[in-house]
Amino acid sequence: MIFSILSMSLMIILISNIMMMLSIILSKKTFMDREKCSPFECGFDPKSSARIPFSLHFFLITVIFLIFDVEIALIFPMISSFMMTNFIIWMKISFFFLLILLLGILHEWNQNMLNWTN
């Protein structure tokens, strides 16, 4: 029993190492492709200082997008639960949920968070 587990573990390690070595040998990486392999996040050069200030408005737009993206994902189960619950209760919950979303977007609009040119 133990011998079979050890032999299987050895085979897994051997096969994974062979596959990694083959990928390193057969890859077509050159010095010219160095930029393609570097991580790219938000337009920053990864080799420069990480303390460069960036636009706060870019961050706010991203947070607003994430909030409303999650809210839309929460609306889909409300649609499927329509037939399973009482209509009046479903309408109250849906109205309350959509009211919170509407108040949130109105607040962002009043704070000029949705205008790109500030």
Image (tube, rainbow, N blue to C red):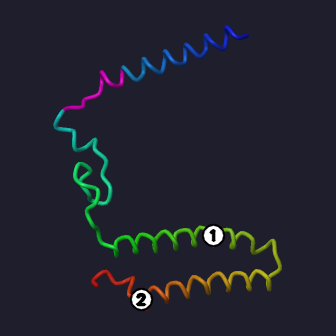
The residue most toward the right is: 86
Amino acid type at image mark 1? Leu
State which quarter of the image contains the N terminus: top right
Of residues 40 and 93, the one drawn nearer to the viewer in this rendering: 40
Which residue shows up at 34% across the image and 84% down it? Answer: 115
Which residue shows up at 66% across the image and 14% down it? Answer: 5
Answer above or below: position of 96 versus 77. below
The local secondary structure at tag 1 comes to: helix
Q: Residues within 10 Å of mark 2 (few under 14, many from 20)?
A: few
Answer above or below: position of 57 versus 118. above
**Between discs 2 and 1, the one toward the N terminus:** 1
The residue most toward the bottom is: 110
Tag 2–tag 1 contact (CB < 8 Å) = no
Q: Is residue 68 left or right of residue 40?
A: right
Residue span colored magenta: 22-30
Which residue shows up at 52% across the image and 72% down it? Answer: 67
Q: Quadrant of residue 7?
A: top right
Which residue shows up at 28% across the image and 44% down it? Answer: 38
Q: Nearer the viewer, mark 2 or mark 1?
A: 2
Answer above or below: position of 52 versus 104. above
Q: Is residue 7 left or right of residue 15?
A: right
Amino acid type at image mark 2? Gln
Q: Which dot marks residue 111?
A: 2
The local secondary structure at tag 2 comes to: loop
Q: What's the CA distance linking mark 2 and mark 1?
A: 25 Å
Residue labelled with disc 1: 74
Q: Is residue 42 left or right of residue 17?
A: left
- Tell me where residue 76 appears, x and y as whole percent: 64, 69
Magenta-drawn stretch contains 28: yes
